[in-house]
Amino acid sequence: MSRASGYFKTNYRSDLVLVETRFQWFWVGLLALVLLVFPFVLGPFGLDLANQVFLAIIGSVGLMLLSGHAGQISLGSAGLLAAGAFTTGILVKETGASIWLTLPASALVGGLLGVIFGLPSLRLKGLYLAMSTLALHFIVIFLGGEYETIRGFSTGILIDPPVILGWEFSDPRAWYFGLLLIDLAVVLFALNLVRSRTGRAWAAIRGREVAAEALGISVHWYKLSAFVVSSVLTSVAGCLFAYYHSFVSVEAFSLFLTIQYVAMVIIGGLGSILGAILGAVFVVLFPYVIEWAMEVLPVPARFADFIFAVNFASFGLIMILFLVLEPLGLVGIWHRLRDYFLEWPFRQKPLGS
């Protein structure tokens, strides 16, 4: 559906256009300008937050493709991030490999894990499938911990900043632009993938597997492909996570990290790439907003000692509120705001209201 009057689609090519109107091009250009200027007006803390958001978006988009579009439950995000990070750390420490080797190696490991832990999805559903993917987390964390113990890295694996074309990525501003380009590529890839034959097959499987199979869709193949694509993206995010923090440790990939990624797709809005982006921004910034609120508002001093407990409690409350009051997530709120202004001042009350 065109989002403004005067624009009509007359062929399939126009139906595939991502940016439909001149008005949308204006906002895309404004967003690009803001993103380019953003790192030059932020301090080190703001740049670090932006880079954390960019890292989270990669894994969030990967999980959205699997759960939001293919309808497959996964609790293995933290394990896949750890797999990519430990693959990078081991290759750097043992062979001195560069990012040109560690990045594709992390993607390959993620793809293999996607196949291995995607196979149960051919037989299992619901809670049983979730538990099988949760096993991925514990297996990867166990193997990573064993490697740290055997090699004597009791405090974690230290990694030097990556060097790309002779340029060392140690400056947060350099990371900002690098991660921004990667996020742009990932988002464009995901947007086009969900509109392809593969994306339509995932949507059919999410709706009804029996009906999808009756239509000639290879349910087994497309389920595995969803796990592989999601796992590759998440593992690549883990590789970049290791390089950005210059450190890999099992403590960085707790089960709470998996919950955060599940929250990103729920709070953002299931089935929407925009929802994955909005959810990543919300979940990454939420703890800092709570800390800021506790400093600004007249909160009793004794609560300052329980800031982590307040963060966790607030996070759980927000997830419950979204599930009960706003199941479409942040993207649902955005769509209602957009439609309101598009229809104003000709918005009509529904019949019978």
Image (tube, rainbow, N blue to C red):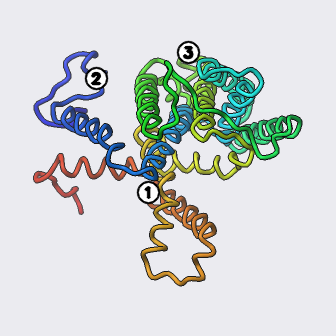
**Is residue 210 visible to the viewer in this orientation of the structure?**
no
Amino acid under disc 1: Glu
Residue wearing tag 3: 216
**Residue 139: mark in rendering:** none
Element under label 3?
loop
Left or right? Give the position of 118 relative to 171. right
From the image, which quarter does the N terminus lie in?
A: top left
Indicate which label's residue lies in the foreground, 3 or 2.
2
Q: Residue at x 49, y 18 (%)?
A: 165
In the displayed structure, 253 sits above or below 243; it is below
**Which quadrant would residue 87 be assigned to in this image?**
top right
Q: Which residue occupies 45% across, 82% down?
A: 298
Q: Which of 175 and 304 is in front in this view?
A: 175
Q: Label 1 belongs to which residue?
A: 326
Q: Nearer the viewer, mark 3 or mark 1?
A: 1
Where disc 1 sits, the SS reads: loop
- The amino acid sitting under disc 2 is Val
Q: Position of residue 239 (x, y in %)?
A: 62, 31
Mark found first going from the N terminus, 3 or 1:
3
Q: Is residue 192 visible?
A: yes
Image coords of residue 125 (percent x, y): 69, 37
Determine which of the numbered discs, if any, sits on residue 17 in the image. Answer: 2
Mark 1 nearby-residue class (10 Å; few <14, some 14–19, many ≥20): some
Residue type, label 3? Gly
What is the CA distance from the residue labelled 1 to the residue labelled 2? 29 Å
Coordinates of residue 266 in the picture (x, y in percent) = 51, 49
